Amino acid sequence: NAGVTQTPKFRVLKTGQSMTLLCAQDMNHEYMYWYRQDPGMGLRLIHYSVGEGTTAKGEVPDGYNVSRLKKQNFLLGLESTAPSQTSVYFCASSLLTGKNSPLHFGNGTRLTVT
Amino acid sequence: GESVGLHLPTLSVQEGDNSIINCAYSNSASDYFIWYKQESGKGPQFIIDIRSNMDKRQGQRVTVLLNKTVKHLSLQIAATQPGDSAVYFCAENNPPGGYQKVTFGIGTKLQVIP
């Protein structure tokens, strides 16, 4: 039982390049989330999904897109990246709504945009 | 306790002593609270949660206290061990309705002195 797995662990991009962050969970959770973590700020929600085939915007969605084609996978796309997207990105999942149950996090993807 | 700023509040505790980490939450309508532990280079890990109809909940070596009157949450760790060194942050859910937003604090760094 691996929990939540994120790939890649690290990535360095040049401004304007694009990439996709992958997240997989093996707990059969309905809810999945993408957060970013920056120094001096709490985790901020980018996008989330309440089930296979659904996605919704979070607190800071601009510059990101997501897809949930399979229940166990949640992909975060960054097109034409900017230095402001330098951050640590965490994927999380929860059995019930995150407003009433704890989140299970992956170990993050550290992205640097130069 | 937690505060907004670039530098994390730090709590230094002698090994074997008890630790108390404080958190002031923002929304009086929040009814679910969670403490997470984040070790360096890893994702946040669920420790313990509490609902607003309780004022205390105990786990293994940890206790969470909730004071709704002053919107204050605390995490007590008994007999602190070197493995407890990490950043701890609290999270509160949003009031009913709206999107899946859970508000995270920026955290308190716990340093255990051997």
Image (tube, grey):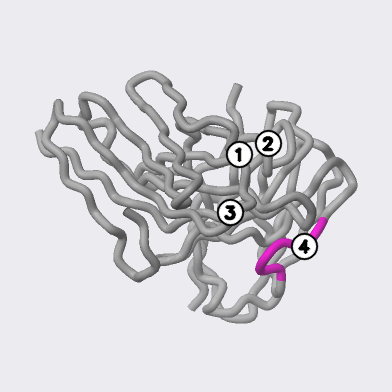
Q: In the orientation shown, which residue stands out farthest toward the front?
A: B69
Query: Quick check: B114 left or right of A52?
Result: left
Q: Of residues A80 and B65, which is closer to you in this image?
A: B65
Of tags 4 and 3, the one toward the viewer is 3
Q: What residue is pinned by disc 3? A: B28
Badge 1 amino acid: Leu
**Are the two marked residues, 2 and 4, in contact with CB atoms closer than 8 angstroms?**
no
Q: In the orientation shown, which residue stands out farthest toward the right?
A: A53
Q: Is residue B11 magenta?
A: no
**Are the two marked residues, 1 and 2, in contact with CB atoms closer than 8 angstroms?**
yes
Q: What residue is pinned by disc 2? A: A94
Rendered residue at 50%/45% (across/down): B68
Q: What residue is pinned by disc 4? A: A57
**Mark 1 or mark 4: whose residue is earlier in sequence:** 4
Disc 4 element = strand
Rendered residue at 60%/30% (across/down): A3
Disc 1 element = loop
Q: Of residues B70 and A50, which is closer to you in this image?
A: B70
Query: Quick check: B75 left or right of A22?
Result: left
**Are the two marked residues, 1 and 3, in contact with CB atoms closer than 8 angstroms?**
no
Stretch of the chain drawn in magenta: A56-61
Q: Rounded to the nearest whole Å, what is the CA distance between mark 1 and mark 2?
A: 5 Å
Please state, as top left, top right, bottom left or bottom right, where the N terminus of chain A lies in the image: top right
Disc 3 element = loop
Q: What residue is pinned by disc 1? A: A103
Above/below status of A57 relative to A84? above
Q: Rounded to the nearest whole Å, what is the CA distance between mark 2 and mark 4?
A: 17 Å
Chain letter for mark 2, please.
A
Q: Rounded to the nearest whole Å, what is the CA distance between mark 3 and mark 2?
A: 24 Å
User: Which of the 4 quarters of the picture holds residue A56?
Assistant: bottom right
